[in-house]
Amino acid sequence: MRFPRRKHLPNFCPPHPSWPLIRLAARLVPLVLRLKYGQSSPRVSRKELKVLRGFRGCRLVLTPNHPDKADPAVIGWLAARAGLERPYVLANRAQFDGWWGFKGRLMQRLGAYSIARGTVDRSSFKTTRQLLSDPQQANQLLIYPEGGNYSRSESVFPFLPGVFGLIAKAQEELSDKQSAASIAPSPRSGLFVVPIALNYVVHDRHVESKIDAALRDLEHYVGLEDGAPQPRAQRIVALGERMLSLAEGNEGLPVVVSLSPFERLERMQLFLLEKVESRLGFSHSERQKQAQLRLSVPERTRKVIEAFLRISEEDYVPGTAYEETLMRRDLASAENLRLELERLQNWMDVQRGYLQEHGSVNHLVDIVRRFEWEIYGKVHLTVRRRCLVRLATPIEVRPFTEHASGAKKETREAQVLALTHQVEASVRHLLLPSSLSHGSRSKPRAKSP
């Protein structure tokens, strides 16, 4: 959730793709994954890859979940393996100002263009529709329908209907342009959405010893005394309860004996959320409005993240020395708020039964890394991982836009929601353990304890 302190590029960064550079970058993905992210090469089943290759030359929107910062590299590798010739990427505007703007220019050459999250970015929306509705050129576009990276490898954050509303609008424009150009529709002439599931699994033979060492350090840090050896599951539960008790005491939350550990966790999540909302200036009336809309806590969390990004990405050039001093104070305050938001996200990912579920070594690693983030403010446990890529059959968008031109607003919204739910359900199904075990030739080396 880093944000730029000074913008080096315009508010909207259009794509300037260099296809030779994109092909070269795809070949370097395994090296980048190994050196930067400590990961082995991704894996995808030949059967699913063959299906995607059958859609070469078609207009595709790739809609994966977004569990890791390495996701763009993995999708670039997948696009190259499938023979997709014109891949574009929709990326958060905050990513473009790194390295004094050089990172953004490189991203533009790699086919990326910007969107300001949480705003009506008309330039970005227009570019998306133009790319997807070009009647003469079939482009492929990568969009993250979760709206951001939420570090959830085995689950999915709710997909944004607005993303699929934009896709549906592009399909309508494509149909109009094809009719105006007297282009006869064919089974593959429309727009297709490709549900993709990315799941990072541990691929490290020393993972169990690393987990035990990390647990010993965490126990020492929170003041748990060394006693008789206990099973790893009991140690994790004890560590989680100890962390929760210390956090409650630090925040001044009273002890309620009748509350279960998960109810206490939910209380902590809501407390952190309301504290961040207050610091962002969310009024009580706006909270009431959110309650009327029946927003869940994760959805409210996404709204405060988007509000923070809108504030931190504003252009501001100080005119005097005093204004520069005020700006530095604002930046320091925003940095503290960013840390609170990252802490909130870390707590939000913990759901009912999270500490009691020990079905895989991947889950254990995930738990320990979350503990480390809460206690140390950063992750120390490093293990070698591999991304398992699952693909569903592409979904045609045209049936979800039928009668859209003369339909009522409620009907159009219902069609968009139906498309959203179908794509989200496909990704969730692909992430099921049974689907992952049958969909990839790769299995983690380490056995679950």
Image (cartoon, grey):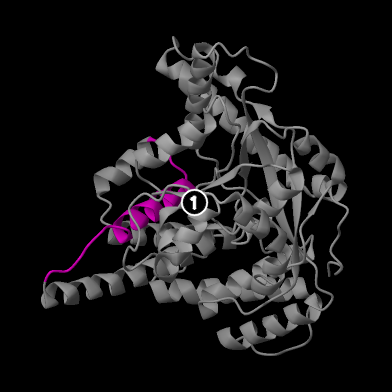
Mark 1 is surrounded, within 10 Å at the Cα level, by few (under 14), some (14 to 19) or many (20 or more) other residues, namely: many
Please tell me which residue is depicted at 53% across the width and 12% down the height of the picture.
Answer: 179
Is residue 253 something one can see in this rendering?
no
Judge by depth and name the residue closer to the eye, 342 or 22: 22
Q: Which quarter of the image is occupied by the C terminus?
A: bottom right
Whole-percent x, y for residue 125 in the image: 42, 37
Q: Which quarter of the image is occupied by the N terminus?
A: bottom left
Judge by depth and name the residue closer to the eye, 151 or 269: 151
Judging by the rendered image, the residue that carries numbered circle 1 is 91
What number of labels is visible? Answer: 1
Judge by depth and name the residue closer to the eye, 202 or 20: 20
Whole-percent x, y for residue 403 in the image: 51, 11
Q: Could you tell me the amino acid type at mark 1?
A: Ala
Please tell me which residue is depicted at 86% across the width and 45% down the height of the picture.
Answer: 46
Q: Is residue 296 above or below residue 1?
A: above
Q: Is residue 196 above or below residue 351?
A: above
Whole-percent x, y for residue 292 in the image: 36, 36
Judge by depth and name the residue closer to the eye, 307 or 372: 307
Q: Is residue 409 left or right of residue 109?
A: left
Residue 246 is one of the magenta-drawn residues: no
Is residue 395 something one can see in this rendering?
yes
Q: Is residue 165 left or right of residue 65?
A: left
Please tell me which residue is depicted at 67% across the width and 39% down the height of the picture.
Answer: 195
Whole-percent x, y for residue 12 in the image: 36, 49
Residue 296 is one of the magenta-drawn residues: yes
Q: Is residue 113 left or right of residue 6?
A: right
Label 1 SS:
strand
Q: What residue span does the magenta drawing correspond to?
A: 293-319
